[in-house]
Image: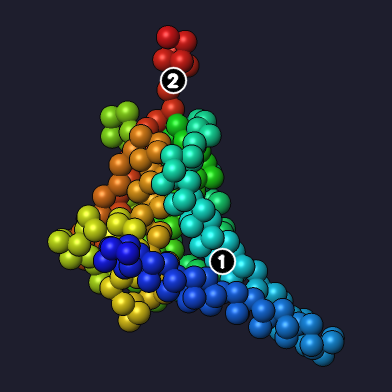
Amino acid sequence: MSAEGEKLRGALLNSVSHDLRTPLVTVIGAVSSLAEADGALEAADRRELTMTALDEARRLDRYVQNLLDMTRLGHGALAPKREAVDLREILGVVRNDLKRVLAGHRLLVETPRDLPPLHADPVLIGQAIANIVENAAKYAPAGTSIAIKARPDGDMAEIAITDEGPGIPEAERERVFDLFHRVAEGDSRPAGTGLGLSIVKGLVEAHGGTVAARAGPDGRGTAIVIRLPFAPSSSEEAE
């Protein structure tokens, strides 16, 4: 096996053994506590254990979906079901899905009311944005803000997700979209499969868009900027 192949094999094993197993162990622990309590738990404790299991199951589902989508992208089998979709609707779903992930941060959303609809698969683009926001929540200190700002740029929407974390060195800003890049750097950094931003790149490019990592406002933190096409107008469709 080549050195690169061995590196990827090791990274994937690390992802499966740690990043996928960790939420699964948490789910098993929470559900076991509920099953063994036999009605002895207070309602608030039962709810907390149930929400913990649900959140970790959702996190596990996102990790597995990332693995499946990366496989489909690698084989050219992922075909977005594109439609005219309001970005604010996508962001509403993302906010709800990541409610507990974002519990320690302020999520600020700024989208113009007259922003044209995107020409996108709402599920896939929602997944891409969720990956970016979840990644920001891992690296940014608790109590800081994560901002999502959108603006029109010609026939594209520019969506910037910024955080107040340590930032990404300029030399690394392209490499963060490489497969397993985070995992290969070691275990001292926050948990994750190293697939998140690689998936973002694949999903955005499948829509004819682009994604880039930049320094955050005033050089602080990180900004992940994606550009996606607007839906064609009725006159353009008629042509």
- Quick check: marks 2 and 1 in contact, CB under 8 Å? no
Q: Mark 2: few, some, or many residues within 10 Å (few <14, many ≥20)? A: few
Can you give x and y, in whole percent of width and height, for residue 226 in the image?
A: 33, 45
Nearest the viewer among 165 and 112 is 165
Nearest the viewer among 23 and 238 is 23
Q: Find the residue positioned furthest to the front.
A: 1
* Residue under the image location 22 percent in, 55 percent down: 174
Left or right, 174 with respect to 157, comes to: left
Residue named by callout 2: 233
Which element is circle 2 on? loop
Query: Three-letter amino acid code at disc 2?
Result: Ser
User: Separation of disc 2 and disc 1 at Cα?
Assistant: 38 Å
Residue named by callout 1: 60
Can you give x and y, in whole percent of width and height, for residue 165 in the image?
A: 29, 70
> Is 21 located above or below residue 219 in the figure?
below
Q: Residue 105: in sight, yes or no?
A: no
